[in-house]
Image (cartoon, rainbow, N blue to C red):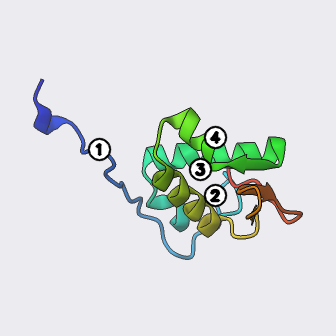
Amino acid sequence: MNDQALPEAGRKIAMQTPPTSPPSELGAAPSSARAALTYAVEQRLRFVDFLLAQYGHVKRAALIDYFGIGEATATRDFGAYHQIAPGNMALNPSDKTYYRTTAFVRVWN
């Protein structure tokens, strides 16, 4: 198989959407905020969104265990989720857990 024909790992694929486009049916976050996400990052952020919706909390270890990623990557993912949905979660520094806020709205249904 030709290795040059394979896409680069982690390459971002940007979608062409106008900045005035309404939020998509996937949730309240603007599509431009999610357009630059790689598939892997989007899947991890969907997982964070699901855990917050179903259980009300999520830890970095959940992402590390489920996806086999490093601590720094999990931390970046929480930062990315916070940029997409700033009012959805709050960190409790005593137990290093992100908890769902009362203003929580699913980003991905």
Q: Dot 2: few (<14), some (14–19), or many (≥20) neighbours within 10 Å? A: few
The label on residue 45 is 3
Q: Amino acid at mark 2?
A: Ser
Residue 101: x and y in percent read: 84, 62
Residue 12 relative to residue 109: left or right: left
Check disc 1 and report its element: helix, strand or loop. loop
Of labels 4 and 1, earlier in sequence is 1
**Nearest to N terminus: mark 2 or mark 3:** 2
Q: Who's the residue at 54% across and 58% down the image? A: 75
Mark 2–mark 3 Cα distance, whole angstroms, equals: 16 Å
Q: Mark number for residue 9? A: 1
Q: Secondary structure at mark 3?
A: helix
Q: In the displayed image of the protein, which residue is found farthest to the front?
A: 94
Crowd class of label 1 (few under 14; some 14 to 19; many from 20; radius 10 Å): few
Residue at horizontal 54%, vertical 43%? 43
Q: Is residue 88 left or right of residue 108?
A: right
- Mark 4 to mark 2 CA distance (whole Å): 27 Å
- Disc 4/disc 3 C-alpha distance (Å): 12 Å
Q: Amino acid at mark 4?
A: Ala
Badge 3: residue crowd in 10 Å (few <14, some 14–19, many ≥20): many
Q: Residue furthest top?
A: 1
User: Which disc number belongs to residue 24?
Assistant: 2
Q: Amino acid at mark 3?
A: Leu
Residue sitting at 82 percent across and 42 percent down?
A: 55
> Residue at left 57%, top 76%?
20
Query: What secondary structure is marked by label 4?
Result: helix
Would residue 84 be seen by someone viewing this image from the given angle?
A: yes
Distance of mark 4 from mark 1, alpha carbons? 23 Å
Of pointers 1 and 3, the one earlier in the residue sequence: 1
**Which of the two labelled residues, at mark 1 and mark 2, occupies the earlier sequence position?**
1
Q: Which residue is mark 4?
A: 62
